[in-house]
Image (cartoon, helix red, strand yellow):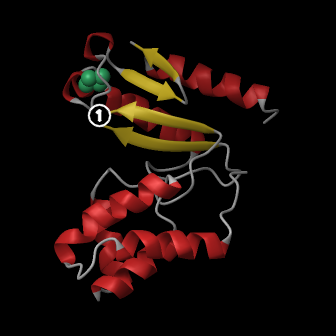
Protein backbone atom coordinates (compact mmCIF):
# COMPACT_ATOMS: atom_id res chain seq x y z
CA UNK A 1 0.00 0.00 0.00
CA UNK A 2 1.25 3.54 -0.70
CA UNK A 3 2.40 5.30 2.45
CA UNK A 4 -0.31 7.45 4.02
CA UNK A 5 0.58 11.12 4.41
CA UNK A 6 0.15 12.28 8.03
CA UNK A 7 -2.81 14.71 8.20
CA UNK A 8 -0.78 17.45 9.91
CA UNK A 9 2.01 17.32 7.37
CA UNK A 10 -0.53 17.37 4.57
CA UNK A 11 -2.38 20.39 5.99
CA UNK A 12 0.87 22.31 6.46
CA UNK A 13 2.05 21.54 2.97
CA UNK A 14 -1.31 22.50 1.47
CA UNK A 15 -1.28 25.78 3.35
CA UNK A 16 2.24 26.56 2.17
CA UNK A 17 1.24 25.98 -1.44
CA UNK A 18 -2.06 27.85 -1.23
CA UNK A 19 -0.58 30.85 0.56
CA UNK A 20 2.11 31.10 -2.11
CA UNK A 21 -0.75 32.43 -4.28
CA UNK A 22 -1.86 35.50 -2.30
CA UNK A 23 -5.21 36.92 -3.40
CA UNK A 24 -5.68 33.86 -5.56
CA UNK A 25 -8.46 33.87 -8.11
CA UNK A 26 -10.17 31.22 -10.21
CA UNK A 27 -7.46 31.57 -12.90
CA UNK A 28 -4.99 30.26 -10.31
CA UNK A 29 -6.92 27.01 -9.86
CA UNK A 30 -4.96 24.87 -12.33
CA UNK A 31 -1.49 26.16 -11.30
CA UNK A 32 -2.35 25.59 -7.63
CA UNK A 33 -3.59 22.07 -8.33
CA UNK A 34 -0.45 21.37 -10.38
CA UNK A 35 1.74 22.48 -7.47
CA UNK A 36 -0.23 20.26 -5.09
CA UNK A 37 0.13 17.28 -7.40
CA UNK A 38 3.88 17.93 -7.70
CA UNK A 39 4.08 17.82 -3.91
CA UNK A 40 1.94 14.73 -3.24
CA UNK A 41 2.02 12.96 -6.61
CA UNK A 42 -1.78 13.18 -6.68
CA UNK A 43 -4.63 15.43 -5.55
CA UNK A 44 -5.76 14.29 -2.12
CA UNK A 45 -9.41 14.94 -1.27
CA UNK A 46 -8.22 17.34 1.44
CA UNK A 47 -6.59 19.43 -1.29
CA UNK A 48 -9.84 19.74 -3.23
CA UNK A 49 -11.57 21.07 -0.08
CA UNK A 50 -8.72 23.39 0.88
CA UNK A 51 -8.56 24.92 -2.61
CA UNK A 52 -12.33 25.18 -2.82
CA UNK A 53 -12.36 27.14 0.46
CA UNK A 54 -9.55 29.42 -0.64
CA UNK A 55 -11.04 30.19 -4.05
CA UNK A 56 -14.60 30.29 -2.72
CA UNK A 57 -15.74 27.71 -5.24
CA UNK A 58 -17.81 24.59 -4.49
CA UNK A 59 -15.59 21.52 -4.02
CA UNK A 60 -17.67 19.73 -6.68
CA UNK A 61 -16.70 22.45 -9.18
CA UNK A 62 -13.00 22.17 -8.31
CA UNK A 63 -13.22 18.40 -8.74
CA UNK A 64 -15.09 18.59 -12.03
CA UNK A 65 -12.60 21.10 -13.49
CA UNK A 66 -9.64 19.02 -12.29
CA UNK A 67 -11.09 15.80 -13.65
CA UNK A 68 -11.66 17.42 -17.05
CA UNK A 69 -7.88 17.48 -17.50
CA UNK A 70 -5.91 14.27 -17.92
CA UNK A 71 -3.20 15.99 -15.90
CA UNK A 72 -4.49 15.11 -12.48
CA UNK A 73 -4.55 11.95 -10.42
CA UNK A 74 -7.00 11.51 -7.58
CA UNK A 75 -5.36 8.63 -5.80
CA UNK A 76 -1.79 7.99 -4.71
CA UNK A 77 0.23 6.23 -7.38
CA UNK A 78 0.59 2.47 -7.00
CA UNK A 79 3.70 0.36 -6.65
CA UNK A 80 3.41 -0.09 -10.43
CA UNK A 81 2.49 3.19 -12.05
CA UNK A 82 1.40 2.69 -15.65
CA UNK A 83 1.55 5.59 -18.06
CA UNK A 84 -0.08 5.16 -21.45
CA UNK A 85 1.02 7.69 -24.03
CA UNK A 86 -1.83 9.51 -25.68
CA UNK A 87 0.29 11.65 -28.02
CA UNK A 88 -0.56 11.80 -31.71
CA UNK A 89 1.82 9.05 -32.92
CA UNK A 90 0.78 6.69 -30.14
CA UNK A 91 -2.86 7.52 -30.67
CA UNK A 92 -2.49 6.66 -34.38
CA UNK A 93 -0.78 3.42 -33.33
CA UNK A 94 -3.87 2.49 -31.36
CA UNK A 95 -2.75 3.33 -27.83
CA UNK A 96 -6.47 3.54 -27.02
CA UNK A 97 -6.66 -0.26 -27.45
CA UNK A 98 -3.87 -0.64 -24.89
CA UNK A 99 -5.63 1.70 -22.51
CA UNK A 100 -8.85 -0.29 -22.89
CA UNK A 101 -7.00 -3.55 -22.20
CA UNK A 102 -5.29 -2.17 -19.09
CA UNK A 103 -8.55 -0.76 -17.75
CA UNK A 104 -10.20 -4.12 -18.33
CA UNK A 105 -7.35 -6.05 -16.66
CA UNK A 106 -7.08 -3.78 -13.62
CA UNK A 107 -10.69 -2.59 -13.41
CA UNK A 108 -9.66 1.02 -12.93
CA UNK A 109 -9.97 4.24 -14.90
CA UNK A 110 -7.15 6.57 -15.83
CA UNK A 111 -6.19 8.73 -12.83
CA UNK A 112 -7.02 5.96 -10.38
CA UNK A 113 -5.32 3.12 -8.53
CA UNK A 114 -6.35 -0.42 -7.65
CA UNK A 115 -7.72 -0.92 -4.12
CA UNK A 116 -4.65 -2.91 -3.08
CA UNK A 117 -2.45 0.08 -4.05
CA UNK A 118 -0.46 -2.08 -6.45
CA UNK A 119 -1.33 -0.51 -9.80
CA UNK A 120 -2.19 2.99 -10.89
CA UNK A 121 -2.98 4.23 -14.37
CA UNK A 122 -2.47 7.52 -16.13
CA UNK A 123 -2.73 8.76 -19.71
CA UNK A 124 0.07 11.13 -20.58
CA UNK A 125 1.09 13.32 -23.50
CA UNK A 126 4.01 12.43 -25.84
CA UNK A 127 6.88 10.71 -24.03
CA UNK A 128 9.36 11.56 -26.80
CA UNK A 129 9.64 8.11 -28.35
CA UNK A 130 7.11 8.51 -31.17
CA UNK A 131 9.10 6.32 -33.60
CA UNK A 132 8.56 3.45 -31.15
CA UNK A 133 4.84 4.02 -30.70
CA UNK A 134 2.67 2.98 -29.05
CA UNK A 135 4.54 3.50 -25.80
CA UNK A 136 3.58 2.39 -22.30
CA UNK A 137 5.78 3.17 -19.32
CA UNK A 138 5.58 1.12 -16.13
CA UNK A 139 7.62 2.85 -13.44
CA UNK A 140 10.93 3.47 -15.22
CA UNK A 141 10.59 0.79 -17.90
CA UNK A 142 9.38 1.73 -21.37
CA UNK A 143 7.43 -0.87 -23.34
CA UNK A 144 7.48 0.10 -26.99
CA UNK A 145 5.59 -1.06 -30.07
CA UNK A 146 3.41 -3.12 -27.76
CA UNK A 147 0.02 -4.57 -28.54
CA UNK A 148 -2.86 -5.48 -26.25
CA UNK A 149 -1.77 -9.12 -25.87
CA UNK A 150 1.74 -8.09 -24.83
CA UNK A 151 0.40 -5.59 -22.33
CA UNK A 152 -1.86 -8.25 -20.87
CA UNK A 153 1.15 -10.61 -20.52
CA UNK A 154 3.23 -7.89 -18.84
CA UNK A 155 0.48 -7.22 -16.32
CA UNK A 156 -0.08 -10.93 -15.74
CA UNK A 157 3.66 -11.33 -15.11
CA UNK A 158 3.61 -8.57 -12.50
CA UNK A 159 0.54 -10.09 -10.85
CA UNK A 160 2.35 -13.44 -10.72
CA UNK A 161 5.41 -11.84 -9.12
CA UNK A 162 3.12 -10.22 -6.56
CA UNK A 163 1.32 -13.53 -5.89
CA UNK A 164 -2.03 -12.22 -7.11
S1 LIG B 1 3.25 10.28 -29.20
FE1 LIG B 1 3.72 8.68 -27.82
S2 LIG B 1 5.84 8.87 -27.57
FE2 LIG B 1 5.35 10.54 -28.85
Q: Residue at x 62, y 50 (%)?
A: 114
Q: Is residue 11 above or below residue 107?
A: below
Q: Residues within 10 Å of mark 1 (few under 14, many from 20)?
A: many
Decide if residue 70 is on the left or right side of residue 14.
Answer: left
Q: Residue at x 67, y 55 (%)?
A: 115
Q: Residue at x 21, y 23 (%)?
A: 92
Q: Is residue 119 above or below residue 91?
A: below
Q: Position of residue 9 (x, y in %)?
A: 62, 70
**Nearest the camera: 77 or 158?**
77
Mark 1: which secondary structure? loop
Q: Position of residue 61 (x, y in %)?
A: 30, 78
- Residue 66 falls in image quadrant: bottom left
| Whether the residue under disc 1 has CB within 8 Å of ligand 1 | yes
**Nearest the camera: 48 or 85?**
48
- Residue 69 falls in image quadrant: bottom left
Q: Is residue 67 above or below residue 83?
A: below
Residue identified by numbered label 1: 86
Quadrant of the picture in which ligand 1 is shown: top left
Q: Position of residue 136 (x, y in %)?
A: 43, 25
Amino acid sequence: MPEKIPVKTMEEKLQTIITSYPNSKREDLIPILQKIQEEFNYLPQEAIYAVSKELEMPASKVYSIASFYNLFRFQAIGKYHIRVCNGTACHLSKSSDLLREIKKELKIESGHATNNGLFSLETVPCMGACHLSPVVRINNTYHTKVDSDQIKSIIDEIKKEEDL
